[in-house]
Amino acid sequence: MKYRIYSAIALLIILLLFPLPAIAANPSHIVKLQTMQTCQVCDLTGAYLPVSKLDYTFILSSDLSRANLIGSSITFSNLSRANLNGANLSHVNFKHTKLLLTDFTNAIFDKTDLTEADLTSATISDSQLAKAKLCKTVLPDGLVSDRDC
């Protein structure tokens, strides 16, 4: 009995110190994205894809909410109509990427590169854009920002 209590406490401490990522993404959709460079209307919710090379991909109308994409390269891609609500996009390279009508509500932007990206009609706040690199970037209102060129 005593050992069960100690084991339960040790397991609880380990889980609190090293939480497992919540993975709800469809595994076959992740494989499809990584192998075929395309995934339309995919469930990638909570996907753990840090430092991924996803250049020239088409991830149209897909759910990437709460995904971890820290340090990934997603250049020359199309993520139009994607849901990136709550995603961690720190240090992501979105150069030359179409992000039309994309939902970035509560997404984390820290040194995210949006050079020549198209954010037309995207849901994104000014505070999020303040932490991103903007150079020849089409903003949600259609205006072009050269702030960081």
Image (cartoon, grey):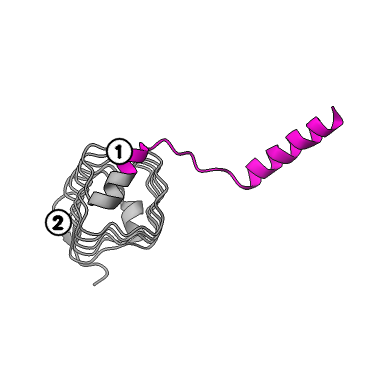
The one nearer the camera, 68 or 8, is 8
Query: Which residue in the rendered view is the most extreme toward the left?
Result: 142
Rendered image quadrant of residue 75: bottom left
The tag on residue 139 is none
User: In this picture, which residue range is highlighted in magenta?
Assistant: 1-30
Magenta span contains residue 2: yes
Q: Where is residue 129 in the image (x, y as percent from the top left)?
A: 31, 56
Question: In the current view of this chain or complex, which residue is farthest to the right?
Answer: 2
109 or 26, which lies in front? Answer: 26
Which residue does the numbered mark 2 point to in the structure image? 143
Residue 83 appearing in the image: yes
Name the spot of residue 101 as percent of width and height, x first: 19, 43
Q: Tell me, for residue 63, which label it has, or none.
A: 1
Secondary structure under tag 2 reads: loop
> Which residue is located at x 23 percent, y 63 percent?
95
Check whether the beta carbons of the residues at disc 1 and disc 2 lie within 8 A of each other.
Answer: no
- The location of residue 15, given as percent across then percent down, is 64, 41
Vertical placement of residue 96 versus 122, above or below:
below
At label 1, which amino acid type do we have? Asp
Q: Is disc 1 placed on a helix, strand or loop? A: loop
Q: Going by the image, does 20 lie left or right of 5?
A: left
* Vertical side of 44 occupied by 138: above or below: below
Magenta segment, principal secondary structure? helix
